[in-house]
Image (spheres, rainbow, N blue to C red):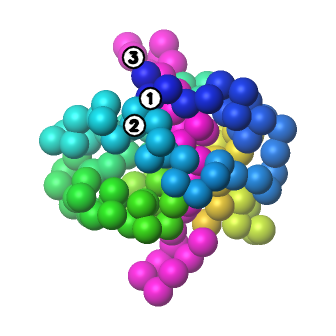
Amino acid sequence: EWSVDQKLADRICNYNRHSAEHFGYFTKTKFLSKVNQNKPLTFYDSNTGEPLFQIPQPNGGGRTWKEFIKESKSHGWPSFRDDEVIWSNVRCLKNGECVSLNGTHLGHNLPDKTGNRYCINLVSIAGRPSSSQQE
């Protein structure tokens, strides 16, 4: 849907512990033009379809789309905060690597002065909901 590179996704999600997409890769896909910024969006594991992140929060708390996009563009990767992570499906390892519970490499936690900031590869979260998520 967002026209991410499938080979890049496979390499980063499955055969990698440290590498990332190039800075700003997500801005060169169809992501920004395809998403409806007027409602919450859930990002799904590219391998399993399990939900991993949601922006903005459906209850109205947390950051706005505008704030999310501004921060993500400034850092070069989609950047999530603690309350945007679906912790039942995501783990952050001691070395800062973020992975899905199923082992998909997502990105890294790079904390800043406002707290944890999870810089996540778009190819890792460009999945579609699993059949169990659609029911």
The image shows residue 82 at horizontal and vertical percentages of 45, 64
Out of 55 and 12, give the one closest to the viewer. 12
Evaluate whether residue 6 shows in this view. Answer: yes
Range covered by the magenta-colored residues: 110-135
* Position of 5 relative to 12 (above/below): above
Where residue 134 is drawn, which disc sits there? 3
The image shows residue 122 at horizontal and vertical percentages of 54, 42
Q: Looking at the magenta stretch, what is its main secondary structure? A: loop
Give the residue drawn at x 55%, y 30%.
4
The image quadrant where one finds the C terminus is top left
Task: Between label 2 and label 3, give the one nearer the viewer.
Answer: 2
Badge 2 element: helix
On whether residue 54 falls in the magenta region, the answer is: no
Quadrant in which residue 40 is drawn? top left
The image shows residue 83 at horizontal and vertical percentages of 39, 60
State how far apart marks 1 and 3 are (Cα): 19 Å
Looking at the image, residue 26 sits to the left or right of residue 42; the answer is right
On whether residue 133 falls in the magenta region, the answer is: yes
Tags 2 and 3 in contact by the CB under 8 Å rule?
A: no
* Position of 98 relative to 111 (above/below): above
- The kind of residue tagged 3 is Gln
State how far apart marks 2 and 3 are (Cα): 21 Å
Quadrant in which residue 123 is drawn? top right
Tags 1 and 2 in contact by the CB under 8 Å rule?
A: yes
Can you identify the residue that label 1 sits on?
2
Can you identify the residue that label 2 sits on?
31
